[in-house]
Amino acid sequence: MDVHRWIVAGLFFLACVFTPASQAGVSSADPTISSPQTERVLAYGLHAINDRYLTRVIIGNVAFEGMRGLGTIDPSVSVERLPNRHVLLRYRDDRVADFSAPGDNDVEGWADLIVRAGRYAAAHSSALQSANREKFYEAVFDAALSKLDIFSRYAGAREAAEHQAARNGFGGIGVRFELHPEDIHLTEVMPGTPAAEGHLAVGDHITAIDGTPLAGLSQDTISQRLRGPVGSSIALSVVKKPSAPASQVTLKRSLIVPPTVSMTMKDGIAVIAISSFNSKTGASTAAELKKAKTGNALKGVILDLRGNPGGLLDQGVAVADLFIAHGPIVSARGRHPDSVQAYEAQPGDPGEDVPVVVLVDGGTASAAEIVASALQDAGRAVLVGTNSYGKGTVQTVKALPNKGELTLTWSRFHSPSGYALHGLGVLPTICTADEKASVASLLAPLREGHSAVIANIAMWRASSIEDQDGRRQLRSVCPAAKQTDLTLDVEVGRDLLADHQLFAHTLALTASQSTASTASPHLPVKQH
C-alpha cells in the first residue's frame, strides 16, 4: 500500500468537520451523489476490502485513494491530505472545502467523507453534477483498488451480471451470432439447447425477437433480448434461406452455460482442450474423458491448457481430481479465516490410469495453473510448453447493494509441493520456447539422460514468495510466451505418449522431486 506524502500547510488548523468555500454552491449539488444509498454502497465496499483483502490495509489510505478518483470524472477536482488530519478539496486552484479526516479504520466515516467531498465538488463541476451514481461508484472503487493489485476490481450492475452469467450460466437459447445491418446470422448453435431442439441451424437469419425488428439494434441490445429468465418464452422470426419468408419459432429459455471443453481423437490419443473454467468444466471434461475411453484403445490424453485464463477454483480442482487418485491438489492461504482452504484428490475417477501430457504457455493462468502444478507434483503428467502466467492468487466476489460487485484478492495458491504459484507460475518439463526447435531436438536430451530439468524443478519448488529477484531469474529458464506454433507442443506430446519408456523416464524427472525442500546452490539452467 503506497503511503501518500503529507503536505504541510498551517493555514488549515481547523477544528470544524468541514469549511465550505461557498454555501450558495452547495445547494446545487447533485442529489444522486449525496443520497444515503451512495454512502451505503461505499461503506459496504470499504468494509469488504477491510475484512477480506489478502494483506491488512489501512482503510483510510484506501478510501483516500478512492476520493482521488473524483478527478477521473473531472480532472479539475483534486484532494490533498494535510498533516493535521485534514483533507483539502480543491477545484482548479480554488479551495472548495476542508474536511476533518476520520480515523484510519473508520469505514463509515470515510464513506461519509467521500460522499460529502463529491457533493461539494459537484457544486463547482458540471461533470460531477451530470455523473450518475454508477459513474461515481466506478470512479471511487477503481481508484481505491488501483493501489492494491491488478486482479482486484469493481464491476457495476450490468458488468457484474455478465460476469455471473459467464461463471454460472444464464437464461438463453444457446446461440452465437454475427451482427448484420438488417438482422443477425447464427454462427453457432450449441447442442442440447433450446435453439438446437427448435431446429435452428448455423446460417439461419433472425430478423425479429418478440415482434421487434432487429434492424439497427446493437449487438449488446440483441444479446440482452435473447436472454431472459429460465423457462420464459421467446418468439423469433427466422429466415432459413435467402428470399424465403420468415417463419415463427417459439422457444423456452433454459440455463445456458457456455462450453469450455472440446476433444479430438487421433491414433488413440485424445486432445482435450479447456478454454476456461466455468460451472460445468469439470463435468464436461469427465464426459469427454469417458467418451475417449469408450470403445478405444486409449494411449493417453493431451490436456491443452494453453491460453486458458482460469476461472472457478472448484472446477480446476475437479479437473485435476479426474487424473489423481489421492493426495493434495492445491492449498490456499490468506488473512481471512474462510480463505484458508486445502483440496485433496478422491479416488474413483476415469483418468487415474491414463498417461497425461499437459500443454501450458504464457496464457495459462490461475485455475489452469492449479491443474498443471497438481498433475506435475503428483507425478501424473509431463508438462510441455513455456512457463505459465504466474497468476497464483484467489479472488473472492462480494456483491454490493447496487447489484455491482467487488472482486478482491484474498489468498494465494500453493502447489502440493509447497511453492507459491503467484509471480512464478509452473515450469514445463519440456520447454518449447524456442520456436525453431524440432520435436527430435526437444526430446534428444531426455533420451540421452542429461536434462537440466531436475535441478530447475528443485529450485522452483524451494523458491520463496519473498525472493522476487530469484523468481524472476527462475522464470527466465523457459520464458513465458503465447505459442504461435500450436502444433509443435501437440506433436511433442504425441511422441511422448507413443514411447512408453521415454514417457515414464520423463515423468520421473519431476515426480522424484515433488517433496524437494532445499534448492540447488547453482543458477538455473536454460532448458532446450
Image (cartoon, grey):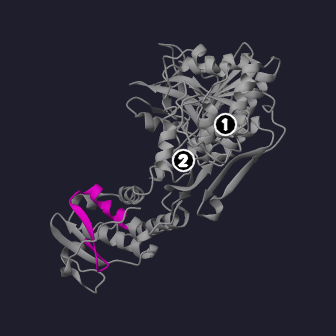
Residue 88 image position (x, y, % from top left)? 25, 73
| Amino acid under disc 2 | His
Q: Which quarter of the rendering shows the C terminus?
A: top right
Q: Is residue 437 visible?
A: yes
Q: Which residue is more in the foreground, 294 or 137?
A: 294
Residue matched to label 1 = 281
Q: Is residue 113 left or right of residue 382?
A: left
Discs 2/1, front: 2
Tag 2 residue: 422
**Alpha carbon separation for disc pair 2 and 1:** 23 Å
Residue in view at x 52 percent, y 13 percent? 241
Reply above or below: 90 against 237. below
Q: Residue at x 56, y 24 (%)?
A: 188
Residue 148 appears left or right of 444 = left
Residue 35 position within the rendered picture, expressed as x and y whole percent measured from the top left? 38, 69
- The residue at 42%/75% (across/down) is 104
Q: Is residue 255 among the parts visible in the rendering?
A: no
| Foreground pick, 159 / 444 | 444
